Amino acid sequence: MQRYEELDSLRGLAALAVMIGHFLMVFTPIVQNTSGLGFLEYPLNLLKYTPLHAVWGGHEAVIMFFLLSGFVLSLPFFLYRQQTYTKYVIKRICRIYIPFLVALFIAIMMREAVYVSKLTDLTSYYNNLWVIPPDSGSIIHHLLFVGNYNTTRYDPILWTLVHEMRISLLFPFIMFAIVKGGWKIGLPLALTLSYGAEMLLANFETRYMTNFVVSLHYASFFIVGALLAKYQKELKAAFTRLNGWWAALLLIAALYSYSFKWIGYSEDFHDMFMPHRGDWMTAIGASIFLVAAVSSVRLSRQLQRKPLLFLGKISYSLYLYHMIVLLSLVHLLNGELDTPLIVILAFVASFGAGALSYYFVELPSIRLGKWLTSWGKKPVIVAGSRTDGASSSI
């Protein structure tokens, strides 16, 4: 099956955006609502309330993650090369859960090693992280992984992985409907799940970001990704028919759609789309980027440059460890170095941690999954995977 290295790079860029966003959130001017100030009056708003927000838009990147996962996981179903459900689940557990488990225990150990007292000179978000010491109940919740619990205790990014794993376990059943019915079933199903989740959230209090209702909403973007995979031939043909100017205008429109949540922030028209309908605007932009990545020869060539491919390889580990590295260095060096310097050190160190985790945790976990499901047969490389065996889907 065809490999999509471009999508690895796209996932890597999304992971980088998440990291940049989290690191910028250390600084108060970034998290303050300054939308009432003009760009000339407050130039930082150019980074916050324009399409430039895509550079550090963490939530937008999460929508991209779910689209990419749906795209890649669906390909074997459309080619009728899907494995048994048991083998599928074993590979997903090895791919997602084992690296998560290692990162979880490293986060707990680092918290115990460097935490002295609550921070007071950063933003409220960071001042309140790692404040509560580990306890057996919380650790058990994390080990069970797919339940509804507070995932910000040790590594605040883990909430997305709970949704990823939960939806992945149900995804083969969703694909039966999409393979048979295409967009006529897939698109209404996606909209129903998303709108239904919005209605439920409006009437029921949900305590944590890992609540099961929100998983219904995010499952809709897995479905959108699967539909992009099913109709990729037609979408590629449509994109390649565009001349240079029209393609450029489409990508600009995609950037505005992708960053929609931050354009016109606090305006009435903007509030009508929040919170979950705004995710659909982001998904439209992300879908265009995905189609462009696999359709445009020029863009594909840029995305296959070695630095971006490496970023794609370590993207899952970079995602897992950047907050652990940042929190560790902030607590270890707070008062010893200026905060901007600590952030820079953490930024560089995160790539090292991501690379180490990729080579010594991710790859062995992926190989374990293949070994457990091969039973002596030559393993089939899943579409979107790299030559070293790492799938582009986290």
Image: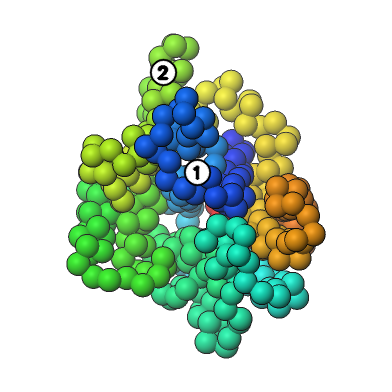
Quadrant (top left, top right, bottom left, bottom right) of the C terminus: bottom right
Residue occupying the point 37% across, 55% down = 218
From the top left corner, tell me how far across and down residue 236 is, in percent.
Answer: 43, 27
SS state under label 1? loop
Q: Is residue 56 visible?
A: yes
The quadrant in which residue 367 appears is bottom right
The answer to whether marks 2 and 1 mark residues whose Cβ atoms lie closer than 8 Å is no
Q: Nearer the viewer, residue 58 or 79?
A: 58
Q: Nearer the viewer, residue 123 or 236?
A: 123
From the top left corner, tell me how far across and down residue 336 is, in percent.
Answer: 79, 59
Q: Is 103 left, or right, of 259 in this rendering?
A: right
From the top left corner, tell me how far across and down residue 240 is, in percent.
Answer: 45, 19
Q: Is 147 left, or right, of 106 in this rendering?
A: left
Residue type, numbered disc 1:
Gly
Instruction: Find disc 1 in the rendering and name its residue.
Output: 57
Q: Residues within 10 Å of mark 1 (few under 14, many from 20)?
A: many
